[in-house]
């Protein structure tokens, strides 16, 4: 432990020199008093702010002036008790002093404890008692005081500071050197001369309920009660020294032979006598000094002893002296006493002389005590020490673990080992498993302890060493597997139902632990090792849980498929929405669970059927075999899926359409009864309907070859028509007896313009039809039907070569007569057309001769009828009426006219000419100008109401 003593700089207070009489520090508030009655309050968080106030002492200017002797500050730093040499006592309200900055010492700020003054009490010791029933701002603490006459008074402070009640609780023939009071349980220890007297507060109340029990010094020191313990020691003959010190639950008392000290609560927990178990530091154990002990204070594990200006610090655990130094000062002044603040975040220690204040800083107090605490098996106290290094914490945990292991408390020992890095993990594991016959026969209790240990180590390595973390994680998983095996073995040999139920619960608990381990380490575990351990041990539930948490859909699919659970497999696929997973397992799922498989595929938006073709064809081959010889045609689910897909998506992959058509064409047709042909045709119609919708997206040649191979004649005919192979289509239809289809092809609109080809097709059709019906009585009707349906493409004379010598004229007479009549009508029509053509020729010749006479002879010197200038000087235009105009004069005349239609056309022409000369034709302008004469047409008529002379000419006639 390191000790530093620092001087508190108070040079700005002039009257300090040899004037300080008391120092108290509580809650980081320093309060010190001067003999002259000045009180100084310094909040150590803001030490620059110093509050000063003056206690109203009696001043006569002589030697007998009233002076302050000592002060006491309560733990909440709200009240100060002041003692003067006139046996007067004052209570000061710190809060009021702070608010008024010490300037107003009214009755609200200070009050006299008159009952003590009246009784002329010489207070030697003070204990502050927390008042649980307080309602005001001043009655939160009461006073338990001891006097030089051996009296113990209980001062109750009311809501008003000036109102106090004093009760005598105890009397001793000797001076009261110190009082220990415990607010929690009401324990009291009184030190008087050579005696220590102890009252147990718990035994002072008849109510055993801790929550309802009233705790008060009045109850503990009731006159009806005797003390629980009394110990006598050799009396120290020093009157005006502080012989008694209290720190939390500990006390120390100075005797003639040494210092008696004890931790009351710790001793009570061990069921020992409180005073009888006290420890003693003998004077011979202290450094030699002729000076008596002036003051003592306690820390958690040390005792600070003041002898004149020398400070000695002793370890409470082994009575060793760890510090002994004197405080140097210029005036060789003596230290008057100690002060400590145990109610702040961290305890602080102080000492003072008549002129100076010093802070005693204890650093690394834990260094000198943690090993000693471990030797005394006080491991929890050691772990609660401040400023422990990581190595020290680790060592304490290891020592605690070893102690618990010796006590066979395996689980707690394992937790301690888990928090220690002092020893390697394998070594700790061997210690935990020590005594078992090999790893395969580990007991459940020790295996659980090993799990606790590894779990603690896992927390340490989580963010430090990924390799060690993974190894420990695998080890924990292996231990869980071993626990499962141990429990299974015990359950197999168990016959009692209650015990079997217990083992089932244990397995559920371990299963829950495994799941929690997986949840907590899902991103860090080695999945291969976990899978292997759980698979080998047959832990199906945990195995599937692991895979689900890892989102390992591949593993789940493989697992369920191995177990032929198609429903669960498809659930995994539907959840994963992974196309690669669907492609990989498409074969086996489609074959074994067809309908559910395609329903699942339909929910997967990013699935590409191109990669499912292999599986679909495999399924289809099995489907063909299963339907062969069957009387009922089963649904082809692969075909259903592909049709659904192309119907709901824009698909351009021809392989998909080819596959659909392939399955439609090659699907076996149920051949049974009279419906066989109808079923065949229905199937062909389905194919044709599909091809009509998607003809451009499949390979027509491939489909045609399939159709011919599997004798889908109607499909083949449709494809031949689609590819404009009409002749082959007609031949195929006729060769398979599909005369109606052949007729339909021959009458197609695309052949209507090509009479020769159409006639050729109909002759083939007629030949087949007539060859089938020559011997039948309805040959006449067939002839009429052929001629009518061919729309006159074939005549009776075209059909004559197809009749044999046995065909009678009676069957042909009507058609022959009709044919001759039609021929005669055509000849008459042609004759009339020839006559009309000759007459038209004569008219054309006459008009031509007449047109030759339409011309005009212009006389020399002919002028423009618009501008009256020579006509030949510029380009001009002559109208049949005899008027002549220059072209530019004619355009101006039209543009100035009221013929808006003609004028608009010329203006439009001019605009187009200005934009692009190449875009207009000059003949267009000539046609517009030659439309009408501007002098003898409606243009001139529209100007009839206009003046014959313009304004310019009129101005020339003005005189």
Image (cartoon, rainbow, N blue to C red):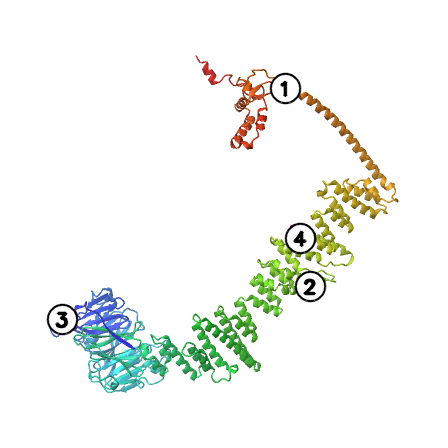
Q: Where's the N terminus, which quadrant?
A: bottom left
In terms of secondary structure, what is the magenta stretch mainly? Answer: helix
**In whole angstroms, how far apart are the C-alphas of marks 4 and 1?**
71 Å
From the image, tell me which residue sits under label 2. Answer: 622
Question: Is the C-beta separation of discs 4 and 1 under 8 Å?
Answer: no
Numbered mark located on residue 269 in the image: none
Local crowd size for mark 2, using a 10 Å CA cut-off: few (<14), some (14–19), many (≥20): few
Q: Earlier in the sequence, mark 4 or mark 1?
A: 4
Question: Dot 1 lies on which element?
Answer: loop
Which one is in front, 549 or 533? 533
At which x and y percent is residue 136? 29, 69
From the image, tell me which residue sits under label 3. Answer: 59
Local crowd size for mark 3, using a 10 Å CA cut-off: few (<14), some (14–19), many (≥20): few
At which x and y percent is residue 492? 57, 81
Residue that sits furthest to the top in the current view: 959
Tell me the quarter of the picture where residue 247 sits.
Answer: bottom left
From the image, tell me which residue sits under label 4. Answer: 699
At which x and y percent is residue 193? 23, 84
**In whole angstroms, how far apart are the C-alphas of marks 2 and 1?**
95 Å
What segment carries the magenta color? 686-700
Q: Is residue 84 left or right of residue 478?
A: left
From the image, tell me which residue sits under label 1. Answer: 855
- Label 4 vs label 1, nearer the camera: 1
Q: Earlier in the sequence, mark 4 or mark 2?
A: 2
Verify whether residue 693 appears in magenta: yes
**In whole angstroms, how far apart are the C-alphas of marks 4 and 2?**
25 Å
């Amino acid at each position: 432990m390191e000790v530093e003593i620092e001087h508190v700089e108070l040079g700005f207070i002039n009257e300090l020199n040899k004037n300080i009489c008391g120092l108290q520090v509580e809650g980081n508030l320093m309060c010190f008093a001067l003999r002259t009655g000045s009180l100084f309050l310094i909040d150590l968080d803001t030490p620059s702010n110093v509050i000063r106030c003056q206690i109203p002492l009696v001043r006569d200017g002589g030697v007998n002036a009233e002076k302050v002797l000592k002060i006491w500050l309560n733990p909440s730093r709200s009240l100060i008790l002041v003692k003067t040499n006139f046996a007067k006592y004052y209570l000061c309200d710190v809060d009021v002093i702070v608010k008024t900055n010490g300037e107003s010492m009214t009755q609200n700020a200070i009050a006299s404890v008159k009952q003590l003054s009246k009784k002329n009490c010489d207070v030697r010791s003070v204990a502050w008692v927390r008042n649980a029933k307080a309602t005001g701002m001043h009655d939160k603490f009461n006073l338990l005081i001891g006097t030089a006459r051996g009296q113990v008074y209980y001062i109750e402070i009311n809501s008003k500071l000036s109102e106090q009640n004093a009760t005598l609780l105890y009397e001793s023939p000797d001076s009261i050197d110190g009082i220990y009071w415990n607010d929690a349980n009401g324990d009291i220890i009184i030190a008087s001369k050579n005696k220590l007297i102890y009252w147990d507060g718990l035994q002072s109340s008849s109510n055993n309920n801790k929550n309802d029990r009233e705790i008060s010094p009045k109850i503990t020191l009731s006159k009806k009660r005797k003390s629980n313990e009394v110990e006598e020691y050799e009396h120290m003959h020093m009157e005006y020294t502080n012989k008694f010190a209290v720190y939390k639950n500990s006390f120390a008392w100075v005797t003639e032979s040494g210092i008696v000290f004890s931790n009351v609560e710790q001793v009570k927990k061990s069921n020992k006598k409180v005073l009888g178990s006290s420890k003693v530091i003998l004077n011979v154990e202290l450094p030699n000094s002729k000076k008596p002990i002036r003051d003592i204070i306690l820390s958690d594990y040390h005792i600070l002893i003041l002898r004149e200006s020398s400070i000695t610090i002793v370890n409470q655990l082994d009575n060793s002296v760890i510090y002994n130094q004197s405080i140097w000062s210029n005036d060789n002044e003596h230290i008057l006493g100690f002060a400590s603040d145990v109610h702040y975040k961290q305890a602080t220690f102080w000492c003072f002389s008549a002129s100076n204040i010093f802070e005693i800083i204890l650093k690394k107090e834990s260094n000198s005590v943690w090993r000693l605490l471990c030797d005394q098996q006080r491991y929890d106290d050691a772990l609660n020490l401040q400023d422990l290094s990581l190595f020290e914490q680790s060592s304490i945990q290891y020592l605690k673990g070893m102690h618990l292991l010796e006590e066979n408390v395996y689980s707690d020992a394992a937790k301690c080992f888990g928090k220690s890095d002092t020893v390697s993990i394998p070594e700790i594991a061997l210690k935990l498993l020590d005594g078992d016959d090999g790893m395969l026969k580990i007991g459940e209790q020790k295996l659980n302890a090993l799990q606790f240990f590894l779990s603690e180590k896992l927390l340490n390595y989580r963010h430090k060493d990924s390799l060690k973390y993974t190894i420990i994680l695998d080890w924990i998983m292996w231990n869980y597997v071993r626990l499962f095996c141990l429990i299974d073995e015990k359950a197999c040999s168990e016959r009692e139902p209650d015990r079997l139920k217990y083992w089932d619960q244990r397995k559920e608990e371990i299963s829950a632990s495994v799941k929690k381990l997986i949840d907590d380490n899902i991103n860090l575990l080695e999945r291969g090792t976990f899978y292997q351990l759980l698979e080998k041990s047959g832990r199906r539930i945990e195995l599937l849980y692991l895979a689900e948490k890892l989102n390992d859909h591949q593993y789940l699919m493989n697992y369920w498929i191995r177990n032929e659970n198609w429903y669960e497999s498809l659930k995994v696929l539907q959840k994963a929405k992974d196309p690669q997973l669907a492609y990989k397992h498409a074969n086996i799922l489609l074959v074994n669970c067809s309908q559910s498989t395609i329903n699942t595929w339909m929910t997967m938006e990013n699935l590409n059927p191109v990669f499912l073709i292999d599986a679909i064809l495999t399924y289809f081959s099995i489907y063909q075999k299963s339907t062969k010889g069957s009387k009922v045609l089963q649904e082809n689910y692969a075909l259903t899926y592909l049709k659904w897909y192309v119907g709901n998506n824009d698909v351009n992959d021809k392989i998909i359409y080819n596959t659909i058509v392939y399955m439609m064409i090659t699907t076996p047709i149920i051949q049974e009864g009279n419906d066989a042909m109808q079923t065949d045709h229905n199937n062909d119609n389905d194919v044709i309907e599909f091809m009509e919708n998607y003809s451009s997206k499949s390979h027509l040649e491939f489909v045609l070859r399939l159709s011919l191979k599997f004798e889908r004649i109607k499909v083949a005919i449709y494809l031949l028509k689609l590819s404009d192979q009409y002749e082959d289509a007609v031949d195929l239809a006729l060769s398979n007896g599909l005369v109606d289809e052949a007729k339909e092809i021959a009458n197609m609109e695309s052949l209507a313009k090509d009479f020769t080809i159409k006639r050729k097709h109909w002759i083939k059709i007629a030949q087949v039809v007539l060859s089938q019906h020559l011997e039948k009585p309805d040959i006449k009707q067939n002839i009429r039907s052929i001629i009518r349906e061919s729309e006159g493409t074939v005549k009776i004379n075209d059909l004559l070569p197809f009749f044999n010598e046995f065909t009678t004229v009676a069957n042909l007479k009507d058609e022959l007569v009709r044919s001759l009549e039609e021929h005669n009508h055509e000849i008459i029509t042609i004759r009339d057309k020839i006559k009309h053509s000759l007459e038209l020729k004569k008219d054309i010749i006459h008009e031509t001769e007449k047109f030759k006479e339409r011309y005009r002879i212009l006389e020399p010197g002919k002028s423009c009828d618009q501008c009256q200038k020579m006509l030949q000087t510029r380009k001009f235009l002559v109208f049949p009426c005899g008027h002549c105009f220059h072209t530019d004069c004619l355009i101006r005349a039209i543009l100035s006219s009221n013929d808006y239609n003609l004028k608009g056309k010329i203006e439009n022409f001019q605009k187009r000419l200005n934009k692009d000369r190449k875009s207009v034709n000059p003949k267009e302008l000539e046609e517009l100008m030659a439309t009408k004469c501007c002098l003898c047409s409606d243009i001139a008529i529209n100007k009839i109401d206009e003046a014959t002379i313009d304004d310019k000419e009129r101005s020339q006639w003005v005189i």
